[in-house]
Image: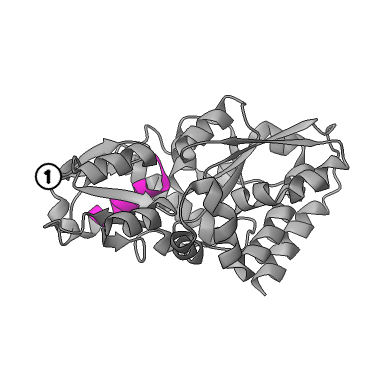
Amino acid sequence: MKFIRAAAVILAVTAFSGPQAAEPTTLRIGVQKYGTLVILQEQHSLETRLAAEGVKVEWKEFPAGPQLLEALSVGSIDFGTTGEAPPVFAQAAQTPLLYVGVEPAAPTGEAIIVPKDSPIQSIADLKGKRVVLNKGSNVHYLLVQALGSANLTPKDIESVYLTPADARAAFERGSVDAWAIWDPFLAAAQAATGARLLTDAKDLAPNRQFYLAHRDFAKAHPALVAEVLDEIAKTDHWAEQHQHEVAQLLSPRTGIPVPVLDLAVSRLGYGVTRLDDKAIDDQQRIADAFFQLGLIPTKVTVRDAVWTPNS
């Protein structure tokens, strides 16, 4: 039923029959190492579909969402996916983005971890400690919420901002006390180091994956954006039913063993849809929290950046 609902939403968008700009010869998509877009890339179904329309697909990989949205901001890509926090930071920086789709919440797919022999036993114990994360990434909000649950703020810890690869190295050599991280890096760290889960995002953050497009691109090519979303919906449906095969497909790409990816894949959300009021309201709460904490310089209205292809 979830796939049927998702497909119905995508097809409703595809049916939009307003005036279309001439299709571009190349669709540039930003991906990270993991997620539905990477599965779509590995299966080549989007290339096959768009080749008949004379559209070439070009994939560009980024270490995390903030870097991907920097590329979107300067027009280096047209479409991509990130977690919750990056588009808030990007919208505050006047990046011309539009939210065009969202996956279901996956709160167990991100967490704050500590070394297995760490004396830290609770979020409250993080006071005065060094916590590493990718600044502006989806776990940034998780960290803020987790600290708040213990009556702490980001000022009560020392935040260390590193990309996942560098953060893993810092975590393993003991130069940081905790790590806020997402799958598959989370699952890999748990397996390789025996890292202990301090908290995941349950009851703290939704951990949604958003699909984003450059505003000009989405407005000029709504039917093409809808075709991409339709292929993502098909990929989601297949992946949810074939999770072990997904792990096998992604293992060479990520360098992570299949058994570890089995865990990560089981924690994904499957079933892309357009943004509903719940997703928009949750995202607005993130934006408001970041503004109140001084993490972004200006208030943003998330709904202003939600795609309405027939307007």
Predominant SS along the magenta part: helix
Identify which residue is drawn at 63% across, 31% down: 77
Identify which residue is drawn at 79% across, 31% down: 24
Kind of residue sitting beneath label 1: Gly
Q: Is residue 171 magenta?
A: no
Q: Position of residue 291 (x, y in %)?
A: 35, 40
Label 1 Cα crowd, 10 Å radius (few <14 / some 14-19 / many 20+) = some
Q: Is residue 137 magenta?
A: yes
Which image quarter holds the N terminus?
Answer: bottom right
Identity of the residue furthest to the bottom in this view: 1
Q: Secondary structure at mark 1?
A: loop
Residue 79 figure quarter: top right
Q: Is residue 23 left or right of residue 170?
A: right
Q: Residue 240 versus residue 104: which sits nearer the camera?
A: 240
Q: Is residue 261 left or right of residue 121?
A: right
* Residue tagged 1: 128
Identify which residue is drawn at 23% across, 53% down: 147
Q: Residue 75 versus residue 120: which sits nearer the camera?
A: 120
- Residue 135 appears anywhere in the view: no
| Tag count | 1
Q: Position of residue 132 (x, y in %)?
A: 27, 42
**Where does the magenta region start and end?**
135-147
Q: Position of residue 53 (x, y in %)?
A: 87, 40
